[in-house]
Image (tube, helix red, strand yellow):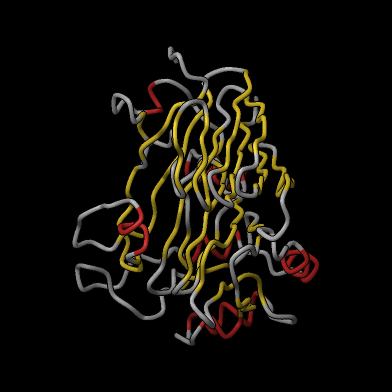
Amino acid sequence: MNSMNLLLKLEPSLSFKIWGGEKLKTIKNIETEKSLGETWEISTHPSGPSQLSVNKTNLSELVELSYLLKYIDTSDNLSVQVHPDDEYAHEHENEKGKTECWLILDAEPGSGIYMGFKPEVTRKEFKTALEAGLAMNNYLKFYEVSAGDFFVVPAGAVHAIGKGVTLVEVQQSSGVTYRVWDWGRVGDDGKPRELHINKAMDCLRFDQGFNRQLELSKKEGLFKDVGAQSLYNHPDFKAELINLGKGDKKEIRLAPKEGLTVLRGSIGLDGEIYKAFDSGIATSDGIVLAEAMEECSILLVKNRDS
């Protein structure tokens, strides 16, 4: 990537969903009647590559990333679903598996996420209930959430983001999702959305140790303290959060393919103003000076080979 700047601003790929909300459209000044569920901010995945703001070139024409960063906003529950691990995804989909992590940015009172099975739920019990058409959310753990909560969602974990939640997600660069249950609703065509029961049952993890670890991965109050904190290390990406107070200055060392997004507030970076929900990609090794115009938070994501 040839540029005078170390950091290049990006434009997201938009993903319209039946469960999408209005917040992302408002923040990004997007005029559409459709429900906007996701903005793929830093992506080279063929299903939704982001673009360079300066010339609208697809980022995928310049680099290949092992991670994908997106914002998600919900007005309804997402389907109960699971993602495969690398081995299963390679064999059945010719793709990577998908482990992801979520940092909650906003949530309506009482809103939350479903993740992991309740204790003692067995594969046989769950499959029988599924075939009987019972409500699958009754078998899952529910976590009420607020801004600053953080969750790791590994491959094999049953999960669903609830309605009224806005979050940022960092994941492996993969598009593989197996729907287990969709709350009995229909899609835009008036028909039930496709489910992937057999593949989902292949991938779901019912062992209690695994599901207990999901609960232990939760962190809270991550926007409270000024400074940098590591969120999650995965073989394909590393995520780090930096909180700055108004007027703070901080040198941030970047490597090629390292991405960042501003989660809250506004900040000067590499001669550009970045506001909340703006994203950029590093073009080479170097240091940018972050100058916080107000209290703000930045999420940094390192590529596998950075």
Name the one closer to the observer, 181 or 162. Answer: 162
Q: Is residue 32 left or right of residue 2?
A: left
Which residue lies at the image location 54% right of the left edge and 61% below the top edge? 105
Q: Is residue 134 left or right of residue 51?
A: right
Q: Is residue 195 left or right of residue 299?
A: left
Residue that lies at the very extreme toward the right in this rendered image: 209
Which residue lies at the image location 67% right of the left edge and 43% below the top edge? 240
Residue 35 image offset from top left, x and y in percent: 28, 63
Q: Is residue 155 left or right of residue 51?
A: right
Name the one closer to the observer, 205 or 76. Answer: 76
| Image quadrant occupied by the N terminus | top left
Count the labels in the image. 0
Residue 77 image offset from top left, x and y in percent: 43, 73
Quadrant assignment, res 144: bottom right
Name the one closer to the observer, 260 or 192. Answer: 260
Residue 235 image offset from top left, x and y in percent: 69, 37
| 84 in relation to 144, above or below | above
Name the one closer to the observer, 264 or 77. Answer: 264
| Image quadrant occupied by the C terminus | top right
Which residue lies at the image location 45% right of the left edge and 73% below the top edge? 164
| 161 in relation to 227, above or below | below
Which residue lies at the image location 46% right of the left edge and 39% below the top edge? 274
